[in-house]
């Protein structure tokens, strides 16, 4: 019984569009002509705001983690390349000695 009442209330609770005389308007000048434009709800509901803030925080956190992991991988590759270069340099003769070709 309570469930049925709940559903009926839910159906009738749907947002009804505000009547035009209720909606606040502001005067905006377009090409020098004053026009009335509706003012939309500038402060969203606290719950929606909170959800959006949480979503943005998670996004930032995710991006930061991604960037840090990429930087770590790049640093690792860089150190690996440096060590490989050092090994390669040890195998080559120093540049002061001219390379002699055997003919």
Image (cartoon, rainbow, N blue to C red):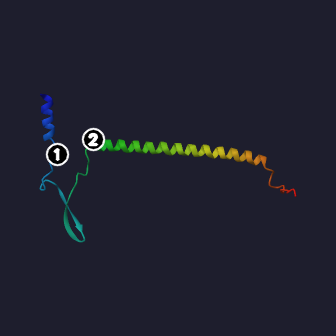
Q: Residues within 10 Å of mark 2 (few under 14, many from 20)?
A: few
Q: Position of residue 55 (x, y in %)?
A: 36, 43
**Foreground of the two, 54 or 95:** 95
Q: Position of residue 13 (x, y in %)?
A: 15, 41
Contact check, label 2 and label 1, Cβ < 8 Å: no
Q: Position of residue 52 (x, y in %)?
A: 33, 44
Residue at the far right in the pictured view: 103
Q: Position of residue 89 (x, y in %)?
A: 75, 48
Quick one: label 2 or label 1, which is nearer the N terminus? Answer: 1
Q: Residue at x 14, y 40 (%)?
A: 11
Q: Residues within 10 Å of mark 1 (few under 14, many from 20)?
A: few
The quadrant holding residue 2 is top left
Residue that badge 1 annotates:
15
Is residue 51 depicted above or below 2 in this figure?
below
Q: Is residue 89 left or right of residue 55?
A: right
The quadrant holding residue 39 is bottom left
**Foreground of the two, 1 or 43:** 1
Q: Residue at x 22, y 54 (%)?
A: 40
Instruction: Describe the element under mark 1 as helix, strand or loop.
Output: loop
Q: Quadrant of the N terminus?
A: top left
Instruction: Describe the element under mark 2 as helix, strand or loop.
Output: helix
Marks 2/1: CA distance?
A: 17 Å
**Foreground of the two, 6 or 26:** 6
Residue at the far top in the pictured view: 1
Q: Is residue 44 left or right of residue 90?
A: left
Residue at the far front in the pictured view: 103
Residue that badge 2 annotates:
47
Is residue 16 depicted above or below 2 in this figure?
below
Q: Nearer the viewer, mark 2 or mark 1?
A: 1
Q: Residue at x 72, y 46 (%)?
A: 86
């Amino acid at each position: 019984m309570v469930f049925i009442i709940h559903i009926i209330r839910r159906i009738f609770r749907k947002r009804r569009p505000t009547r035009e005389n209720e909606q606040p308007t502001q005067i905006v000048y377009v090409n020098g002509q004053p026009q009335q434009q509706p003012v939309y709800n500038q402060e969203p509901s606290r719950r929606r705001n909170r959800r959006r803030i949480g979503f943005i925080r998670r996004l930032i956190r995710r991006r930061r983690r991604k960037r840090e992991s990429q930087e770590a991988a790049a640093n690792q590759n860089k150190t690996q390349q440096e060590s490989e270069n050092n090994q390669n340099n040890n195998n080559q003769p120093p540049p002061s000695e001219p390379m002699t070709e055997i003919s």
